[in-house]
Image (tube, coloured by chain):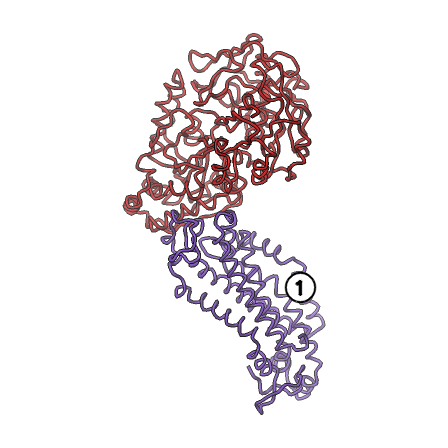
Amino acid sequence: MRVTKGAQIVAGTALLALAVAACGGGGSSSGTGSSSSAAGNAGAVRVEIAEPQHDLIPGNTTETSGAEVLNALFVGLVDYDADKKPYNRVAESIESTDSTTWTIKLKDGYKWHNGEPVTAQNFVDSWNFTANGANAQEGNYFFGSIKGYDDLNPGEGKTPTATTLSGLKVVDDKTFTVELKNPFSGFPTMLGYTAFYPLPKAAFESEGKLKADFGGNPIGNGPFKISKPWKRGTDQTISLVRDDNFKEGKAKVDAVDFKIYTDLSTAFNDLRAGNLDIMDQLPPEGIATAKNEFGDRYIEQPSSGIGYIGFPTKNGADYAKNADVRKAISMAIDRKTITETVFSGTRVPADDFISPVVSGYRQGACGEACTYDPAKAKALFDQAGGAKMGTIEIGYNADGGHKEWIEAVANNLRTNLGVEVTPKPVEKFAAILEDLGNKKWSGAFRMAWIMDYPSPENYLRPQFGSGGSSNYSGFASKEFDDLVTQGDAAKTLDEGIKFYQQADDLVLKEMPYIPVYFYQTNGAYSQHVKNVKIDPFERIDLFNVEKA
Amino acid sequence: MSNDTLPSTAPVQPAKPVKESKPASLWSDAWYDLRRNPVFIIGGAMLVLLIAISAFPGLFDTVGVDAKTCSLAQARKGITSEHWFGTDNLGCDVYSRVIWGARVSIIVGFVSAIVTAIIGGALGLLGGFYGRWVDVLLSRIAEIFFAVPSILGALLILAVIGRDNAGIGTVVLALSLLAWPMILRIMRAAVITAKAQDYVVAARALGAGPGRIMIRHILPNAVAPVIVVSTINLGAFIAAEAALSFLGVGIQSPQISWGLMIADARNRFLEAPLPLLFPALFLSLTILSVVMLGDAVRDALDPKLR
């Protein structure tokens, strides 16, 4: 359900800015220059973040800055390797015979920073807390597939009839079971996400009630622990030190300081000047030079985001309702030049609804429809009667740095299809979504999606399933729904993929959205550190970062 | 511009070498001054050129501003024989866009200046002439508008009404709505001065009605400062249009405005400075020419201020 409004800075590079955009750049002060380095630990690795949207509570963190910090403080049941495949971390095993009831066993030896062992109860407590609608946690919807979720979230105005998820059962200290509403073979892939971290007993004041200061002074189970309480809105540095009792061994660096910036350009200047060590996103204007300047220390890798042009296919204008016109529009967009020129190569042309970062992506799946061919596009457009369907409107949120590429797309359409195009800036992305929800938006609109967990399902059902949580196009197909359900029910994720891909093909044929580009991560690091890796959630693997 | 019927008691008449035997008037004197003022010649010539450009942009541009002329592959290129001012972020010709952008600036500037002069002038004339409650009412209303900082007020107006129908019309409306009180004040003061003159008393004694006195006797003698201020305002309006468009509430794409061009180019200024520099240069030159013109007109019409 992570629809993204776009980078809050300009032209937006990485997802960090995208996801964090919801907080509207809530940081109070900028200018965390050299002064804040004095506040942190001496000799710490300094990492750029934006101000986390909320306090450091796993269940309440769905943006990437907070997740970055929590990733150093906590470890989850699973983590993801270089191929985006989950591997067990706190979990010893995650097994199911029917993809519905999952038995999760924990490894021995993981300890909270206060010395207590990590138990199955810790996970269940944490998940119950987040899944409870009354706690208003951002990560609440992640638990929607677990049995009993509806009792905790009965909807607006109704009182929950339970305080715990009926699908969660503690078997013993190291074992618990999860019962899902429907079979879902991809369930283990979700479990590495921030919202699924456990919470220690010490986090709770009473049952189901979190201590007020926990978010500023969290107790985790990860390789680093907080070195002094952090006050959101005041402190511009979050300081962590290594936890020497961490089960997997000692992290290679003693301490990490997360420095909060409100402006990527300022951070980038600090990185150049040696006042900052790691940035997992670069300002657009810096990317062209960063490649040469940082050499081996420049990171470029695919990330999970996809940028689209969407259409209200049920309630929209004539051109939005016509699949051939949508396909013609798609063929008239010069993705390659747009990604190279407007995005300075920080995006790659999209050719599938499933991102390359998850298994199930097929290069060129979109085929002809995503291939730039002005002549064919024009022929198809005219044949479908597109010329008589009036001016094409493309709505976008003006605060996300989207103007340039939308204008470029508009120029493509004007030139190649000979149609009038009006780009329509709207103050906030939420306004477009609201109008779409109320069926008041008739034109095309920009859209983007970042995965919640590495499964092709996450790119399909929420956006294109009938009644999907983020289905803004109105696309509905029984066949599609059935295929996704079949994919979920498959014994393993790999077996499910072929169903997801068939569902993907249906969407590609109808094109309720036009995939335009895949996002990329552009990061860089200073000479003081080495072995910097960024995972598909834009999180830095700080456990393995070394001093150079 | 000369007005033979103007009474010889017209105000401010410094001694001037007058060649013609015709009796000297404020207007003929002013014109005589202006013709010999290099500032006026230069400013006027520049403005005439800009008016010509905005009236017939097709004669001046090279490749046009149709979307078909933009090629993203050619984005941010430097000066070439085809693209005299380089190309912008979307590969459109900067020179042609600068030429077409002149139209918006000139139209917004002139229309706003004329509208405010007419509204402010007319109300100022009425208020100054009739005095009493008419004056009080008009002055208080004017003060309400006067109290609103103009750019802030225009932002507000455009944010409210301009969301769906942004364009030249709404920008003119927003600017005029906030600028007329200034003209009203100037007109009112000039009218009050003129009203007390002997020739007005004489006209009234001869039985002239209020309408005739206002139009024939007071207006010609009170309009000079309004013309001076309106000319100077012209430059301010052009700058304000660019500022509003830059802030995203004025002219909207696909219309072309210098302010909009500057806004679009600023993010990549270091990489490609031309798309920002040229509209900025033309904006500056336009405002400069108008300000020069305004100075010269003021000098000619109001020699005491020199």
Q: Which chain is purple?
A: B
Question: Residue at coordinates 65% horizontally, 77% vertically from top-left?
Answer: B302
Element at label 1: helix
Residue hosting label 1: B141
The image quarter containing residue B152 is bottom right
Q: Disc 1 is attached to a residue of which chain?
A: B
Q: Residue B43 at what x, y percent from top left?
A: 54, 70
Looking at this view, name the residue that lies furthest to the bottom: B21
Q: Which chain is red?
A: A
Q: Amino acid at mark 1?
A: Ile
Q: Residue A259 at what x, y percent from top left?
A: 62, 32
| Residue A127 visible, this orientation | no
Residue A86 in the image: above or below residue A442: above
Q: Residue A5 at what x, y percent from top left?
A: 51, 38
Camera-side residue of A296 and B286? A296
The image quarter containing residue B210 is bottom right
Camera-side residue of A528 and B293? A528
